[in-house]
Image (tube, helix red, strand yellow):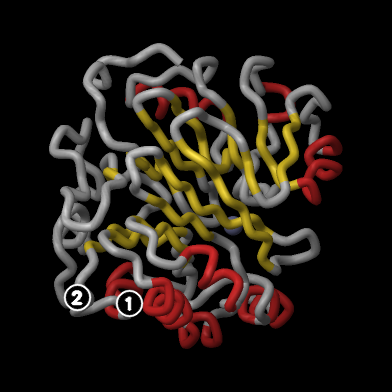
């Protein structure tokens, strides 16, 4: 794609989580030579507007990479709104579902263990248990030598997942719920079971356990916090006094650009285009070192 304003010089790969949560998940991964979406759970209109705010155009994207096709990761509007020029990269086991959701055969690009998307990184995929068809988690290895792990809706921790993500520089991972809030919620029993039963979501404690095993080298980004059954301060508490930086994503506000650099490098671009989680209780965590929750 064409370089955009502010990208003329070589900058590190960067991740911006536009939104994360059960009302829609969508992130942008940008390198000097490419830009893709990871998941497309926001409406096409909202996605286009948010991309424009970042100086990016929908048609200029190099692709959309899907973890899976639940509606909060692939909005129903995309079947009609997908530009012909933008391929949808998805696991082989999800292709049939995508076709039934209106994605043309031409747009679907299936992958197995490796997804070929852009020239300046490789994407390695691993399939995790989640509902019927599973979810793909990703390890991006950039030509800069840095790496990014991205794992959401992963249900449970497996040795294969730990090995897949091991030692990445930046780890974006779901921290979906507080078990106590989940159990005490007025949600129906089947939903609690779906979330907590090993093929739904990770709790805050499970997330922290996975992070401890993966040992990310610089930065952890918490994804997909439940609004009903979690709280950013509780999610942060599970990572207190850890050496990595912590960013907590939101359903309503994008994160700053999170630079994906090797350990010791700056983790958040100083030229972030806008403030992110404004006036909230996790101001102290976004873009700064982890502090014990207040
Ligand atoms: Zn989800």
Residue 248 in which image quadrant:
bottom left
Question: In the image, is 49 to the left or to the right of 122?
Answer: left
In the picture as drawn, the residue positioned furthest to the top comes out as 2
Residue 159 in which image quadrant:
bottom right
Residue at left offset 73%, top offset 33%: 109
Task: Please state which of residues 93 and 142 is positioned toward the viewer in this rendering.
Answer: 142
Relative height, residue 234 to residue 166 (above, below): below
Which quarter holds ligand 1?
A: bottom right
Determine which residue is flagged by label 2.
Answer: 293
Q: SS at mark 1?
A: helix
Q: Do callouts 1 and 2 mark residues in contact (Cβ within 8 Å)?
A: yes
Q: Give the spatial CA distance, label 1 vs label 2.
A: 8 Å
Judge: label 1 CB < 8 Å from ligand 1: no
Q: Is residue 46 visible?
A: no
Q: Residues within 10 Å of mark 1 (few under 14, many from 20)?
A: some
Task: Please state which of residues 15 and 18 is positioned toward the viewer in this rendering.
Answer: 15
First reached walking from the N terminus: tag 1 or tag 2: 1
User: Residue 117 location in percent, x, y?
Assistant: 57, 32
Q: Which mark is residue 234?
A: 1
Residue at left offset 39%, top offset 78%: 208
Q: Is residue 157 visible?
A: yes
Residue at left offset 62%, top offset 22%: 86
Judge: label 2 CB < 8 Å from ligand 1: no
Residue at left offset 60%, top offset 72%: 160
User: Residue 116 location in percent, x, y?
Assistant: 61, 35
User: Residue 118 location in percent, x, y?
Assistant: 52, 30
């Amino acid at each position: 794609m064409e370089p955009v304003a502010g990208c003329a010089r070589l900058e590190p790969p960067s991740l911006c989580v536009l939104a994360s949560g059960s009302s829609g998940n969508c992130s942008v991964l940008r390198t000097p030579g490419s830009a893709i979406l990871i998941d497309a759970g926001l409406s096409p209109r909202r996605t286009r507007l948010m991309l424009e705010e970042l100086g990016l155009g929908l048609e200029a994207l190099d692709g959309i990479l899907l973890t899976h096709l639940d509606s909060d990761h692939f909005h129903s509007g995309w079947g009609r709104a997908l530009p012909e020029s933008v391929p949808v990269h998805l696991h082989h086991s999800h292709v049939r579902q995508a076709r039934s959701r209106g994605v043309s055969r031409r747009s679907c690009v299936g992958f197995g263990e490796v997804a070929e998307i852009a020239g300046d990184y490789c994407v390695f995929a691993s399939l995790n248990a989640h509902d019927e068809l599973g979810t793909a988690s990703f390890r991006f290895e950039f030509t800069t030598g840095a790496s990014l792990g991205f794992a959401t809706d992963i249900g449970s921790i497996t040795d294969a997942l730990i090995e897949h993500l091991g030692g990445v520089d930046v780890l974006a991972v779901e921290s979906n719920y507080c078990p106590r809030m989940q159990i005490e919620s007025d949600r129906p029993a089947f939903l609690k079971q779906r979330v907590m039963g090993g093929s739904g979501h990770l709790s805050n404690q499970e997330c922290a356990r996975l992070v401890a095993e993966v040992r990310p080298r610089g930065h952890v980004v918490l994804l997909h916090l439940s609004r009903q059954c979690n709280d950013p301060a509780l999610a942060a508490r599970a990572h207190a006094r850890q050496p990595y930086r912590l960013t907590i994503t939101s359903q309503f506000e994008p994160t700053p650009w999170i630079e994906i650099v090797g350990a010791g490098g700056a983790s958040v671009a100083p030229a972030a285009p806008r403030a992110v989680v404004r006036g909230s209780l996790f101001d102290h965590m976004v873009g700064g070192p982890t502090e014990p929750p207040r």
